[in-house]
Image (cartoon, rainbow, N blue to C red):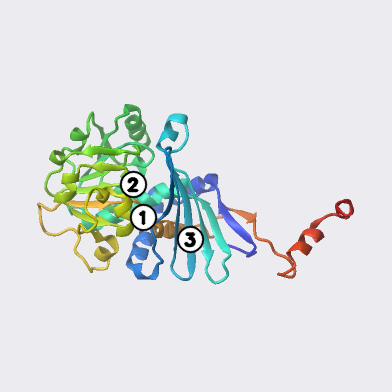
Amino acid sequence: MIPNLNLVPFVSVDNMMKLVLRVGVENFIAGLAEYVEADFRRWACFDKTPRVASHSAEGVIELMPTSDGRTYGFKYVNGHPKNAREGRQTVTAFGVLSDVGTGYPVLMSEMTILTALRTAATSAVAARHLAPRDAGCMAIIGNGAQAEFQALAFKALLGIRRFRLHDIDPAATAKCVRNLAGQGVETVPCRSAEEAVAGAQIVTTATADKQRATILTDNMVGAGLHINAVGGDCPGKTELHRDILLRSDIFVEYAPQTRIEGEIQQLPADHQVTELWQVMTGAAAGRRRDAQQITLFDSVGFATEDFSALRYLRDVLAGTGLYQDLDMLADPDEPRDLFGMILRSARPAELGAAM
């Protein structure tokens, strides 16, 4: 895929959309999900650190780095809820994958679309281990940019085909219903969160406002439910009433980060949680044979998931031609002669004028 190591393949938004449609949305999510789970299963291989965040009154800008010792990856991502009111995306992102041995980047990509895909894939991967085995109906509360991806991920990985939808903005729900038409699922618009949750075995919350909100109250959560809490992902931003957390078995990606950003920021720092890799490797239990158990995946997004997404993208991209080569790495004939490379690049007339 990379004939010249000094040229870096770049996947634009346009090429990402073409690639996803060529592979198929559900196939893309399913393939990405396998990479996500494979990397969780080798958790010990990764450098792990909470994301580096710069918060402001308007939102947050973050860097999310990790490495498995052979490959390094990072994502730049923002979260600005007010952007939606101005016709902009709430979340935008790009990412880089690099070779640890040389330090050279080997892939750059847009990650606004890719993050939406990996978030949904991670949710569904977690639900395979945590949701009731007989789940057939899912509520999605918050029908913004993530909703359709969540629905198709749970269809692809868990066979869920009935979705009860609610958003405080009816236009968002109408958009979601319209986009999921013809996708092999049934959508039921609901007038309230309470109505959406009724009859669902899985509930996803994916709201955007940067505040301590109560999207789910304690009385809305019955025995046996699996909650996929996606929207609470920064300090001061939550979606669930604290009493729900006290009744649930809580699963997280990386506890030091989730305690800062997730629903569990409402709880004492020593409250028991289980990291998802422990469930996947059999080191801890996930969904038990207990009809009363409430499981909560307190998802804030972690760097290994972006690493997995970039790794999957690199592999699925091969042979497609759906990328551009960027000339972004200097390549002097003599590695120490960077200035000479600049001089030799000038045409004779330009060089004379510079003298």
Amino acid identity at mark 2 = Pro
Query: Looking at the image, which residue is at 16% across and 37% down?
Result: 198
SS for tag 3? strand
Is residue 132 positioned above or below 339 on the image? Answer: above
Q: Nearer the viewer, residue 33 or 300?
A: 300
* Residue that badge 3 annotates: 73
Is residue 203 positioned above or below 348 on the image? Answer: above
Amino acid identity at mark 3 = Gly
SS for tag 1? helix
* Residue that badge 1 annotates: 30
**Mark 2 burial class by Cα count in 10 Å: few <14, some 14-19, many 20+:** some
Eye-nearest disc, 2 or 3? 2
SS for tag 2? loop
Q: Nearer the viewer, residue 79 or 97?
A: 79
N-terminal label among 3 and 1? 1
Quadrant in the picture for residue 288: bottom left
Residue 130 falls left or right of residue 39 = left
Residue 290 falls left or right of residue 82 = left
Q: In which quarter of the image is the N terminus?
A: bottom right
Q: Residue 344: horizontal and vertical position, in percent?
A: 81, 61
* Residue that badge 2 annotates: 235
Q: Can residue 265 be seen in this view?
A: yes
Q: Which of 3 and 303 is in front in this view?
A: 303
